[in-house]
Image (spheres, helix red, strand yellow):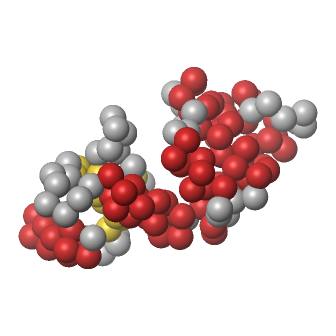
Amino acid sequence: MLPEFYIEYLKTYLPSSELLTLQILVWLLQVHRQVRIERLASSFPYPIKCESRRKKIQRFLSLPRLSLPLLWFPLIKKIIASQYKKGDRLIITIDRTQWKNNNISMVSVIWKKSAPPALRFPQRIGRSKQSITHLLVTFIQER
């Protein structure tokens, strides 16, 4: 399940039905360790046909208010601001993956045995170490 800190924050941004859907999806991900929507839909506790559950999950995950910049990045900023003082040591990870034709690069802050994403690089960023380092330094200076 989601930590209480996340739930309190999410209550201010999501209606209760969407918050419940998010909590159920997180629980299903933790139990099944599957990211396939079909697998999640077959286990989703909602009294409708499986295909309808799949479409409901797809619509839910594509909601604009669940986007990284609008919801999750401010949450990460709040975690950093509340848990770390200036001069404290932050542990940051950088991950880059190729998914189909998309180059996805993320910076995550390790916090209490989890690593929520803190910054997503635009796709135009190449694989060069200098470009990633430059963006990372800019990210740290902004915080």
Describe residue 51's horizontal placement relative to residue 126 as left or right: right
Residue at horizontal 66%, vertical 55%?
11
Q: Residue at x 79, y 50 (%)?
A: 17
The quarter holding residue 51 reads top right
**44 on left or right of 130:** right
Q: Is residue 127 above or below residue 92?
A: below
Q: Is residue 81 left or right of residue 135?
A: right
Between 34 and 10, the one lying in front of the other is 10
For the question of whether residue 125 can be seen, the reply is: no
> Where in the figure is residue 138, as x and y percent of width and height?
20, 75
In this rendering, is residue 58 above or below 24?
Answer: below
Circle count? 0
In terms of depth relative to the viewer, which is nearer, 111 or 36?
111
Q: Estimate the x, y position of residue 24 in percent, counting from the top left.
A: 68, 37
Q: Quadrant of the N terminus?
A: top right
Quadrant location of residue 42? top right
- The quadrant the C terminus occupies is bottom left
Residue 46, position in %: x, y? 84, 35
Decide if residue 86 is in sight here.
yes
For image coordinates 62% across by 30% down, the residue present is 28
- Residue 20, position in %: x, y? 73, 44
Residue at the far top: name it.
Answer: 31
